Amino acid sequence: MKRIRVVVLMTIMLTVGMIAVAATPTAEEQYATIQSKDLSSQSLEEISKSYDKLNEAIANEAEQARKRLYEARSKGDKEAYYEAREHLSLLSTYRMDQRTSDYLLEQVLGLDEPKKSEYAAWLYEHSPYYRPTLTLDFSSEGENYRYSYRQQIRKIPGSEVVLPSSGQMRMNSARLGVLAGWGVTPDEVTYQAGETIKMSNTNQTLYAIYQEGVRFVDPLSGTDVFIESEDVEVPTPVADDVSAIFAGWYDKSTGTLITDPSSYEKVGKGGYFEALWKQLAIEDITVLYYDKDALPTNTQMSMGFSYANTGTVDLAGLRATLSSESEYVRILSDEIYLGSLDAGLMSTNNSRWATSDKQQVRGENNTFRFVIASDAPSGTVIPFTLQVKNDKGDTWTQHFESVVR
């Protein structure tokens, strides 16, 4: 009796499921219904819900069609294979047409925020014809030159767009001058260079507006100076970081380097200069195989370290020296050669190559060697000084201490 109840229950559930499936319109039927309705008689909400349901049906049928496609391929059933492929091809045609897309855009633009942005983003997702474009026009012309370049951006309406700044541009500043900002007209600044704006709902063009003068920019020291006059007084930035050594001003668009402020004369319409800094960070000083706060006496030990070029200038001819003022320390090898290190990279005293990630000191090759005297009392603090120097004589120093076991 119990078994009969189970069979009856399963039959009822199967029947209900089949009825539900039969009651759900196919993607083809839903598309035909949408096409038959007058757009002007429906609200945006009604139209969007219809397309949401259509896309859900398309996704479900496409998944089933792909399954049939793979099954038919595995069984070698050509007829079933072509039927599934034809169904997939047909489903791809059930999309919003341009007439509908244009009509909906007109309705969306008449809304107030935030509904306008919400429906614009929805239309961007559902219409293959709605792809608003923001064009950035960098073009400029003057005596004996003409520069023409445009960049196009396509993103979801309302999403953030960061406008280019002078530091990102590679155009000749001596001919163009300095980027003052971006305008909806070619002769007036609407947005500042580097400003974040919202992606427009329709096609828009912003024009680069240039200004004659010289600009000096440095985030490290907070320097941002713009000079319009012919007499350019070159600033000298000062950084709070004691490891930073000022190396000059560089305009990458013209390749102009200023190392002697008194010798600079403005060329053409101006220049965009960024500060160059030599910086080196000494990190993770390691006594191999021993705890540097519990060092043994009368034992030869090796010491290494990791370091990073945190500046904007490549460093060459690097050498490191180790010294100590303690009477209990005998340094056997006090200098090691490090070579070169490009800006933004890290290395150790014996790495085979530099990387962008921090490395660990490994092995005794190319390390400092030292011995602590046997009569050094337990708990004695041993001061060390590690200094790195480049081929220009710039130095970076790290003081640290170890303790006798």
Image: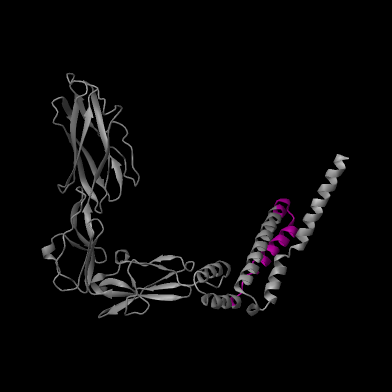
Instruction: Return the x and y of residue 291 as percentages of the image width and height.
Output: 29, 27
In front of the other: 112 or 301: 112
In front of the other: 131 or 45: 45
Instruction: Return the x and y of residue 33 as percentages of the image width and height.
Output: 71, 72
Q: Residue furthest left?
A: 262
Query: Magenta stretch containing residue 74, yes or no?
Result: yes
**On the picture, is 149 further left or further right than 155?**
left
Residue 17 visible in the snapshot = yes
**On the picture, is 137 further left or further right than 83?**
left
In front of the other: 357 or 118: 118
Residue 194 in which image quadrant: bottom left
Instruction: Return the x and y of residue 362 as percentages of the image width and height.
Output: 32, 34
The residue that appears at 18% across and 31% down in the rendered structure is 383
Instruction: Return the x and y of residue 137 as percentages of the image width and height.
Output: 37, 74
Query: Magenta stretch containing residue 54, yes or no?
Result: no
Magenta stretch bounds: 71-98
Where's the C terminus, which quadrant?
top left
The residue that appears at 66% across and 65% down in the rendered structure is 53
The residue that appears at 79% across and 59% down in the rendered structure is 19
Residue 334 visible in the snapshot = no
Residue 151 in which image quadrant: bottom left
